[in-house]
Image (tube, grey):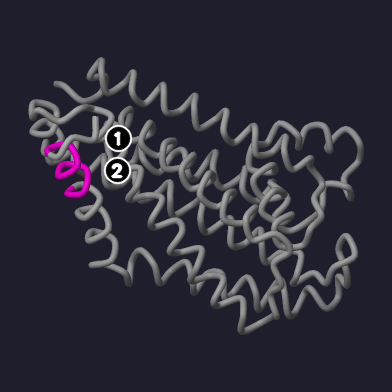
């Protein structure tokens, strides 16, 4: 699979994807840092002082991992969905489909671009957070593993969305009506232990909850969710989305007119 021609194809797609979002960094990277700065100021500094502690940590310490994860999720997803749909819209994807490039290389190239943007944005938000709080990481390996797996999962989800999208409006439906609610209700700003028992069980159906809590465990060493269950679920979603994305590419669904 990774013969020299395929390696050139993969590196070309990845380079194109990275160059795409770094060239317009004011639109792709800067907004996340500004938005998260506002979250830190409003929720962390102003409201957080009134809330006090959450699970034994200051409110700022509690929400920082969730806000970093929020930026990783949204940027990984949006990078792939917008880039791949643009390729469909401009019909440049048809050139890739007829070229002697395996579909797995095409998928890996776009997903790698989404992962790189997600990790880069998460790093920027982490640097911004250092201006508000001293960050101590309890388990750096868990932090690295979860951020890579999460950005990989949502890059794949963005790819699937782009395949089915028929207009630019379609690529905003999922982030607006599904991704954003799941993220805000995924334990970023609160511990699910505060919820009534019924709503705690409902929250367990939210996949974002597992990612946020696994990431928070890497920072603070505590979590509302079993860490290995969370990681196992993320891996399950990655395998499922990878298989589905490859099926769509091999069948040409949504790609050939």
**Residue 236 shown left or right of residue 102 in the figure:** right
Looking at the image, the residue that sits furthest to the front is 3
Determine whether the residue tagged by mark 1 lies in a helix, strand or loop. helix
- Measured as percent of width and height from the top left, residue 229 is found at 72, 34
Q: Quadrant of the N terminus?
A: top left
User: Which residue was labeled with disc 1?
Assistant: 107
Would you place residue 244 above or below residue 112 in this image? Answer: above
Q: Return the residue nearer the eye: 87 or 214.
A: 214
The residues tagged by marks 2 and 1 sit, at their Cα atoms, a distance apart of: 6 Å
Tell me: residue 67, above or below residue 243: below
Dot 2 and dot 1 residues touching (CB under 8 Å):
yes
Q: Position of residue 240 (x, y in %)?
A: 49, 24
158 in the magenta segment:
no
Residue 250 position within the rendered picture, expressed as x and y whole percent measured from the top left: 25, 18
| Residue at numbered disc 2 | 110
Q: Residue furthest top?
A: 251
Question: In which quadrant is the C terminus drawn?
Answer: top left
Seen at 79% across and 58% down, the residue is 221
Instruction: Label 2: state its secondary structure.
Output: helix
> Where is residue 116 shown, x and y percent of the image?
38, 56
Q: Does residue 171 sit above or below 242 in this rendering?
A: below
Q: Residue at x 48, y 48 (%)?
A: 151
Tell me: 229 left or right of 51. left
Q: Residue at the location (78% across, 32% down)?
A: 202
Which label number is shown at residue 225? none
Query: Magenta-highlighted stretch: main secondary structure?
Result: helix
| Residue plotted at (86% across, 70% down) | 51
| Image quarter of residue 200 | top right
Magenta segment: 5-12
């Amino acid at each position: 699979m990774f013969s020299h021609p395929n390696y050139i194809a993969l590196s070309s797609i990845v380079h194109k994807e990275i160059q795409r979002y770094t060239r317009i960094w004011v639109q792709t990277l800067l907004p996340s840092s500004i938005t998260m700065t506002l979250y830190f100021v409003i929720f962390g500094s102003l409201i957080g002082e009134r809330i006090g502690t959450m699970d034994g940590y200051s409110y700022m310490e509690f929400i920082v991992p969730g806000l970093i994860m929020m930026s990783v999720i949204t940027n990984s997803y949006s990078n792939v969905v917008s880039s791949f749909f643009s390729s469909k819209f401009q019909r440049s994807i048809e050139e890739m489909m007829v070229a002697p490039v395996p579909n797995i290389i095409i998928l890996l190239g776009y997903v790698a671009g989404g992962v790189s943007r997600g990790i880069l944005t998460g790093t920027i938000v982490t640097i911004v957070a250092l201006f508000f709080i001293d960050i101590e990481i309890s388990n750096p390996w868990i932090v690295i593993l979860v951020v890579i797996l999460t950005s990989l999962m949502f890059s794949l989800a963005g790819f699937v969305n782009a395949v089915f999208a028929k207009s630019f409006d379609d690529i905003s439906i999922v982030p607006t009506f599904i991704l954003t609610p799941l993220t805000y209700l995924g334990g970023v700003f609160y511990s699910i232990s505060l919820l009534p028992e019924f709503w705690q069980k409902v929250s367990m159906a939210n996949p974002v909850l597992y990612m946020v809590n696994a990431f928070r465990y890497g920072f603070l060493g505590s979590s509302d969710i079993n860490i290995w269950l969370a990681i196992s679920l993320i891996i399950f979603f990655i395998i499922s989305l990878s298989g589905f994305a490859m099926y769509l590419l091999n069948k040409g669904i949504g790609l050939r007119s």
